[in-house]
Image: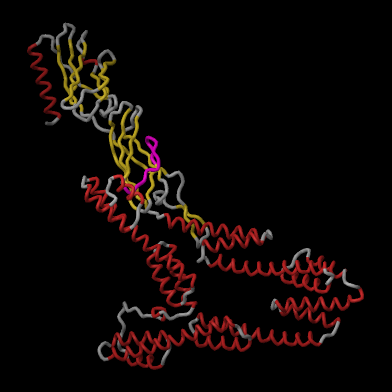
Amino acid sequence: MSARIKFSRLILFIAILCLTSTSCSLYAAEIIAEHDAHVGEQAVLSVNASSIPAGGSVEWSVSPTTGKNPARISLRSGGRELAFTPLDTQPLKVTASFIDRNGNTAHSFEQIITPKEFDIAVEVINDKPLTMWDASKRSNYVLKPETLMANTPIKLRAQLLPAFEGEHSFTWTADAATAVMSQDNDEIFIKRGSVGESEVTLTAYNANGIKLGSGSGRVNITLPISVYEESSRQREAWNSWKQAQSLWENESYSQAVELAARAASLAPRDNEISEGVRAMNTNYARYSRAVKLREEAANLTTANKLDEALRNLRAAQVIWPLDEGPQEIKEAEDRVNEFRLRQQEANWLRDTASAYDNENLFEEALDYYSRSIAIMSNDAVADRMTRIRNRLTLIADADRYAGEGNTLEREGKLQDALNHYAASIMSNPDATLKAHMDELQNVITRRERQANALYREGQELEKRNRQEALRRYTESVNIWPNDRAAKKINDLRNVKLAPDTVLRGPEDFGIGTRLDAQKIINEADELYSQGKLDEALALYKKAGSIASNPDMRNWLSRFEASLKERDAVNAANKLIYDANALYKAGKKKEALDLYRQSLNVHPNPEIEAFLRREGASK
């Protein structure tokens, strides 16, 4: 019925009343509510003062239609206002009767009041944002505010809408996969052991225990704690490495090496840290040797073996110079008999040269050998100087050939690189370079074999699929240059490869050098930093098939196990989510079956505890 129709009927009612009563007049009375009535909160109704007959009053009545009588019914403002507290959401009929001075009812109005329950809003309270470590930029970055991490307390807060003026309290419950850590009325701390969606439900009551309303909230937890812990380890590794460098600069060498080793163990794939630790360990070994030599020099001095003590001090100063080192050497020299001063000086120069010689510092060794022989001739020293000069020439040639070979290898010219490495070894034998040559020769042999195999496949395909044959010939030439495949490509010059053709390279057949493997690892590291873990794993495996080592294999095994763990957690979470829906729908048996199935996919202490409470652990 429209407002106009209602108003017309009201006028008609009043007109009829006026025909039967000499004291009737037209009133614009109505029952006015300050705001919508809510369960458990005082509602206030009023009438216009102009609606009350002169010298008259207002009588109120409140009666429930089906529910409970409201509480705390009272009159205010001389009867013009009625206050009461609804106890449930059932409609209430409110009647305002206007009594004239003679005690007769002049007119009355009725209104149906339907109390509402309060809405409840649930929000996540982040005291501080989560930060992750960017290993490539060596800095922290703040995650989006809505990012929440598994297995850590999450703070939720509830609020009644609209605001409730009086005292109130909340009762909270969480789904089976979510643990309640603590709660304090309108705040609760929850924790979920894995990524997924947590749901909390809550009910609000006023100080008299009247239910004000109920609601629920969902929290999407997207960050596995394993990813955050890996970030923390990388951050800790870098901070430890910087502290280790600071300790080293302050000459706290032992502590620096220990902290650097910890940094390397926390981030085994960080090349900058690994290379820095290797260099620090090398220097620490030299420092340790120098300390040992100085300790031996002290013992030799006590035993009056001055020449040997002096030799150790000089060697120690070459290996690891100290500011006080020259003074120690000078004091040792002063203890030597003046009669043997010239001989001692020659020996000092020769011994110092020998120390440089032992450290492969040949230019410095030649300088000291020359000064020694100028004081006192020595055929052995002269012969050694000749051999050092020849060695320096050979080393220079070897370094040049090795450098050129490395450049050729990076350019993919493996045979030319191998030839230059061979020339380098001829000038200066090097076991490490020889081992690399063996690896390179193996790569070349395998590429030649694979190129021949692709050429034969092309021959077989040429009769029935010339396009596929051209693809095999092209791949053959790309893997290892050969005239036969090149001629076939020329013969098939009128055949075109499909635009989407993907040509395989040596790496696709597990053939490559350590440089090839490192390029693939760099690509995989980039994917890893972007969170594309499955794609990164495929590239890590590809790199491992080309060139691997025990550390790489162990790390790859742990990484692959981590991804399997992630997939199992996701599958279990899907079952838990479906079980939650069944449980809420009252299908308890089906829900418990799904909860048990989720435990077969991945353990979950919260689900196990829930099943024990439900008596359905088996």
Residue drawn at x 13%, y 31% is 2
Place of residue 361 in the rendered image (x, y in percent of width and height, measured from the top left): 71, 77
Above or below for 585 versus 229: above
Q: Is residue 7 magenta?
A: no
Q: Locate residue 54: give its quadrant.
A: top left
Residue 179 highlighted magenta (yes or no): yes
Along the line of sight, the residue nearer the viewer: 608 or 556: 608
State whether residue 505 is above or below residue 106.
Answer: below
Q: Is residue 204 above or below residue 276?
A: above
x and y percentages locating residue 395 in the rendered image: 65, 84
- Residue at horizontal 79%, vertical 79%? 350
Residue 203 percent across, percent down from the top left: 30, 36
Bounds of the magenta span?
A: 176-188
Considering every residue shown, the one lying at the far right of the view is: 339
User: Where's the N terminus, which quadrant?
Assistant: top left
Quarter of the rendering containing residue 237: bottom right
Q: Nearer the viewer, residue 189 or 32?
A: 189
Q: Nearer the viewer, residue 68 or 474?
A: 68
The residue positioned 29% from the left and 27% from the top of the image is 41
In the figure, 157 relative to 394: above or below? Answer: above
Side (left or right) of 248 relative to 384: left
Q: Residue 100 appears at what percent x and percent y?
A: 17, 9
Predominant SS of the magenta segment: strand
Residue 310 image-quadrant placement: bottom right
Query: How are the colours assigned in the image?
Result: secondary structure
